[in-house]
Structure formats: structure tokens, C-alpha cells
Image (cartoon, rainbow, N blue to C red):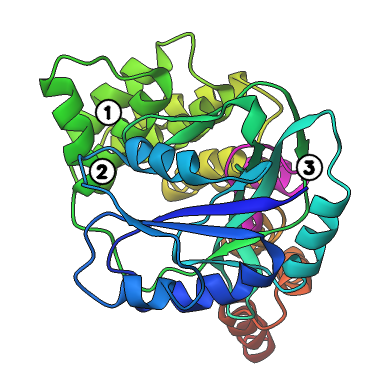
Amino acid sequence: MEISLCMIVKNEEPTLEKCLTSVASAVDEIIIVDTGSTDRSKEIARKFTDKVYDFEWVDDFSAARNFAFSLGTKELLMWLDADDVLSPGGRNKLIELKRNFPRDVSIVYMPYNIAFDEHGKPTFSYYRERIVRADAKPKWIEPVHEVIDAKGKAVYSDIAVEHRKVKTNPSGRNLLIMEKQLKLGNTLSPRLKFYYARELMFGGKTDEAIAAFNLFLADENGWSENKICACNDLSSCYEAIGKNDKALEAALKGLTYDVPRSKTLCRIAELFFKARRFHEAKYWYEAALNAPHSLNLGFNETDYDGYIPALQLCVVYDKLGNKEKAIYYNEIAGGYKPDSPAYLYNKNYFQTTK
């Protein structure tokens, strides 16, 4: 099968060439839809393709992406953002995938790595629908935080896409788009209710975020992975306004949706630690350290799968006066991140405080 790469861009001069260089030899067609660039984005795009089109921006990412998809002529449609690149080795894997694309598969999900440690190892990732069969009639939905709605069998690939952002999005852009939808009388989907609450939180509108998170959590149609994340975010919002009992209640609610996530367990432990309830903190950090680390389909922050709970157990045991245990857990943390400044600081601290 052949792949049409369909992208939307606007003022992506710093990253677009790197993005297209990483993927151009693995795809069979490149469609670039420009939504209003004033820099060299279209000039850069034309180095790789003559299929560069203009689209008038209407505060709707799905509208632009659907236009881009409509221009693809190959059996498979793929998307990237201009500040994405295929991970090392991804080009050859992508070529192999399209050569042996399963006939019964409609959608391919790929890991999306969006944060990295000092060695380039992903610390925050999640799966995104990345390639879809054109005959599955894919349609982008939601004006922002958009997603592909397509029917059929899905598979999960290990071909990762790396998000290498070099510029920030316009301040409050996503929130403004969602508020526009509300002013127009449109109802937010359960998914957008979740992201609306997060945008309010990121924008410092804590009281409004709390109300929005609670509204989302009350929606029985919300995705469980989003609800787990929402509980942690809601907990942080309550803590920010000094409602620590509510913060703990929200964090504990995150345990009710699925097998406990290590981040949720660490959040509970953190609240006990800040309250100087070190024995309770120890219990929850130990639970986090022993939690299963299987990759789920929500947000995956790998530092919580070992490094953070071990490092915090070092601190907790030091507070409890058990230096031997503190050293033990610091070494476990060092096993995950031997160059970590926190691990090295602790190591030196224990060596100099006999």
C-alpha cells in the first residue's frame, strides 16, 4: 500500500524541514495545507512537494485536517504536526509497515513521545491514531484537541513519533476556541469537557477548572483514562486553593476507574508527605513502586514507574530516621536514572553525614 502524508501548517519555518526530511522517503505523497503562514513555511514545503494548498482558518482544526485528508490520493492517510519527527529507525519501520499492511486493519496507533529527559529518553507519551485507511472514511472531529473518527480494526505499532516543539502555541488559543463553541450554544463532548477543564487549569482559572473537572467526572460517557487523569488534576486544583481534604478525596477517586496507576498512588503519597504524615506517605509510595507498569492508552509518564516513588521513599525514610532504608531506595532510584541530580545529591548527602 501507499501513504499520503497530509499536514496542516502555519508559520512552521523553524521545524517543517526537519519534520519532512524525517518522513519524506517513507511516504508516497505529501499534502501540505497552509492556514495562513507569513513566514517561509510554503517555500520549505515546496522543496518536498508541489501539493501545497491554502485553507482559510476558521478556528477549527478538524475542518483544516479534513480538507488535507480530502486531498490525499493513496490508500493510507497519515498525519503529522510540523514539529513532529519520526523516531530513529522509524523510517525503515514505516516502509515495512506499508509493504505488509494487514488487509483487515483500518487504523494504526503509534506512540507519541512529547517530553524527554536529558538523554533523550521519552518521559511522557501516549498513543495517537496516526495512519488510517482512506476507504474507512476517516473524519476528524472536535474543533480543537481533534481526533480521527474511523471504524474498523485497530493495531498498535512501535513506530514512535517525537514531538519536538520549539515554539509555544498562542496564549489561550485552545481555550478561546472551546469558549467560542460554548457561546455558539454548542455542547462540548465528554472528551472536550476534559480538555476544557485542563485548559482552564493551565490558564490559572482554578475555580472554573474545579467546576469543569467535576462536571466531566459526572459524565458517565467520559473515557476512564481521562477520568484518572482528571482526578489527579482536580486534586492539584483543590490543593492550590488550600482545600487539602478535597485534594485527597479527588486523588483517591482516581483509584476507582481501573488498576491503580503509579502516578495516582504517588499523588496520594505526596499529599500525606506534605501533611508530614510520613508513615502513610511511605505506604502509598511503596504501592506506587510496586504497581504494574504496563503501558496503558492514556498519558504515560514513565518517571512515576519506579524513579519518582523510589526517590521519594528515600526522603520519607530519611524523615523517619531510617538511614539504611533511605540509602537503599536512593540506589533504586539511581538504577532508573544514574545521572539524576537528585540521586547524586542524596548519595553525596549520605556519604557526608555519617
In the image, 338 versus 275, the foreground residue is 338
Residue occupying image coordinates x 68% and y 49%: 110
Q: Of the residues under marks 1 and 2, which one precedes in the sequence?
A: 2
Q: Secondary structure at mark 3?
A: loop
Foreground of the two, 198 or 277: 198
Q: Is residue 293 magenta?
A: yes
Name the residue located 58 percent from the left edge and 26 percent from the top edge. 137
**Does residue 152 appear anywhere in the picture?**
yes
Answer above or below: position of 212 versus 160.
above
Residue 148 inside the magenta-drawn segment: no
Q: Nearer the viewer, mark 3 or mark 2?
A: 2
Q: CA distance from mark 1 to mark 2?
A: 18 Å
294 lies left or right of 184 = right
Q: Are marks 3 and 2 in contact (CB under 8 Å)?
A: no
Q: Which residue is tagged 1?
A: 210
Labelled disc at residue 174: 2
Left or right: 120 with respect to 221? Answer: right
Q: Amino acid at mark 2?
A: Asn
The amino acid on which the numbered mark 3 sits, given as a three-letter code, is Ser
Query: x, y (%) of residue 295?
Result: 74, 43
| Magenta part of the chain | 284-304
